[in-house]
Image (tube, grey):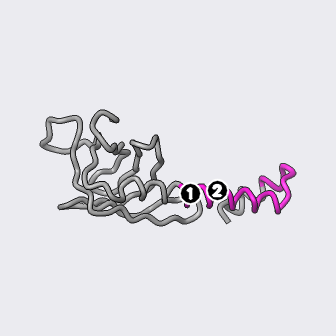
Amino acid sequence: MHFTQREQQALRNAGVDQDTIEAASDAVVEATDDAAAALEAFFDGRETVYSDMDIAHSSSEIQEHTVEYCDLFTHADDIRGYLRFDTWGVPVEGGRVLSEEKVELSLGPTVHGRVRFAADEDAL
């Protein structure tokens, strides 16, 4: 179940029945799965993406990346996984689709921030 025990109790105290709580939880899980699939699909088949990632020793506001793969998994409302570029990679700790041409990922250690990725530079 997506909701914690305290959240479930609060919902029941507010008059929400268990079947409705379970349906809402299932909807959250399904939306998270859909978002992860859409994020993976954004990177799948793209050799190059562009980002607004802040990279040391780069004077450019837009970075170019060669993508090897994006592998995500979900648990309740969490999206986690790994984004691999040609020479390095970074853990993914969340994300969302902004448009057909742009996504945003929360990246873990080494980056520690939210980064927008686009199919072309103009989309950023």
User: Residue 49 has which mark?
Assistant: none
Pointer 1 local density, CA inside 10 Å: few below 14, some 14–19, many at least 20: many
Q: Which residue is denoted by mark 2 in the rendering?
A: 28
Report whether 56 appears left or right of 6.
left
Quarter of the image where the C terminus is located = top left
Front residue (pair 122, 85)? 122
Q: Is residue 18 magenta?
A: yes
Report whether 48 appears left or right of 77.
left
Q: Are marks 1 and 2 in contact (CB under 8 Å)?
A: yes
Q: Is residue 1 above or below residue 13?
A: below
Q: Tell me where the magenta segment starts and ends, as one range.
A: 10-34
Residue 70 horizontal/vertical position (percent): 36, 61
Report whether 94 appears left or right of 122.
right
Q: Which residue is denoted by mark 1 in the rendering?
A: 32
Q: Residue at x 34, y 35 (%)?
A: 123
Q: How many marks?
A: 2
Q: Residue at x 39, y 42 (%)?
A: 101
Front residue (pair 112, 114)? 114
Determine which quarter of the picture holds residue 66. bottom left
Q: Is residue 63 magenta?
A: no
Q: Residue at x 27, y 37 (%)?
A: 121
Q: Amino acid at mark 1?
A: Thr
Q: Residue at x 22, y 43 (%)?
A: 63
Element at badge 2? helix
Residue 68 horizontal/vertical position (percent): 27, 62
Element at badge 1? helix
Front residue (pair 29, 98)? 98
Determine which quarter of the picture holds residue 47. bottom left
Q: Amino acid at mark 2?
A: Val
Q: Is residue 20 above or below residue 102?
A: below
Residue 30 horizontal/vertical position (percent): 62, 60
